[in-house]
Image (cartoon, helix red, strand yellow):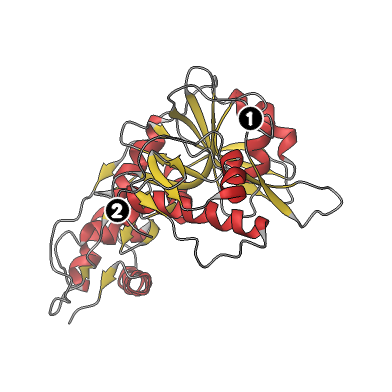
Amino acid sequence: MSTEATTPEVVVEALGVAVGIPVTGETAERLRRQWSRALTDRPATRTVDVTTDDLEDPAAFDYAVTTRVTLAALDATAGQRVNLHAGAVADTDGRAVALVGPSGSGKTTAIALLAEQLGYLSDETVSLDESLVLHPHPKPLSVVADPAQPYAKGSLSPDDLGLARPPESSYLHRLVLLHRGTDDDGLVPVSAARAIVEIVEQSSSLVHLDQPIRRLADTIDACGGAWGLHYREFAEWVDDVVGLLDGEAQEPPARLHHPFDGRGDGAVEGRWSRTAWKDAVEYVDELVVMVGDRVQVLGGLGVVLWLGLAQPRTEAELVGEVTAAWGEHPQAARLVVDALAVLAEQGVVRAPA
């Protein structure tokens, strides 16, 4: 993938990035049709490499191109935006709802159904700046074109599928975490801490952002909290998801931010210490901490101990912290030792040198 400014025959705008696709002839015409909502006259700032792909298998080639375009756009925006593995649609006022979920969670089907009423932004990738402006990625959708061949998917443009067009600009207004399975509990609020963990698992290059956990916490608060959709068939829940746009937002939970303080990551002689962390946010009874690119949710004793390690401490000092917070307990020392072992295994604290 190159970064030189070029102007290939097909240039598409993905997440606000002009990406060139170096194809010609019938292949170029086919891709122009598929990318009808994303074609741009801007010079390409990224160009994908398709030289190793098989032109004799159009379905596989088209899917590979879509993947490469998405990856090029994600690479160009890494460290600047919150990029999520999600689909999104928006109403005429620009209020967008994003559906976050892994491959196989039904995002494409869900977005196609929602886009009968709301404007199609993407079925795969949502890119947000700090003001929650949503940069569209109106890529082709990978769908079953022939019901007689359910495993043979083709790439179809949102125009071919008759999906509604979004307004000129949109912003994230509601956030839904998809849980496709055997129950049909529908939309239920998800705690901010648990939502952050799910979102991190479905994000790209989040670790390159400054204070990424705080950024996600801000996002969740600003869009009225997070909902989980537990469903079997999305068609049964379209109206409920659309209704979220006008529904009441959740009250933002109280929280404290614990940015990394810059300390070294080495073990301290005779004292327990925190592992160098990227970012952390504390809620009433949970704490979300990112170490490297991994995120842990601490609860109960884990929260007390992590907070108590604002400075390196001995086991005895930590037992004192716990009893001061929770009162005396005959097994306090053993409970602290066991909890520290769990935290060390999770990689969020470091044993004494």
Residue 328: name its quadrant. bottom left
Which residue is drawn at the image coordinates 63% and 30% (left, top)? 115
Which residue is drawn at the image coordinates 61% and 23% (left, top)? 243
* Image position, residue 317 (x, y; %): 18, 67
Judge left or right: residue 302 versus residue 55.
left
Q: CB under 8 Å between callouts 1 and 2?
A: no
Secondary structure at badge 2 equals loop
Say if 271 sits above or below 326 in the image.
Answer: below
Amino acid at the residue labelled 1: Ala
From the viewer's side, name the closer residue of 190 and 306.
190
Secondary structure at badge 1 equals loop
Looking at the image, can residue 284 be seen? no
From the viewer's side, name the closer residue of 244 and 82.
82
Which residue is drawn at the image coordinates 18% and 71% (left, top)? 265
From the viewer's side, name the closer residue of 203 and 336.
203
Which residue is drawn at the image coordinates 12% and 80% (left, top)? 269
Judge left or right: residue 228 versus residue 42.
right
* Quadrant including the N terminus: bottom left
Tell which residue pokes out farthest to the right in this image. Answer: 148
From the viewer's side, name the closer residue of 91 and 121.
121
Q: Earlier in the sequence, mark 1 or mark 2?
A: 2
On residue 115, the disc is: 1
Amino acid at the residue labelled 2: Glu
Residue 272: name its quadrant. bottom left
* Image position, residue 226 (x, y; %): 49, 37
Tag nearer the camera, 1 or 2: 2
Say if 316 sits above or below 29 in the image.
Answer: below
* Image position, residue 344 (x, y; %): 32, 73
Judge left or right: residue 23 versus residue 344.
right
For mark 2, what is the residue?
4
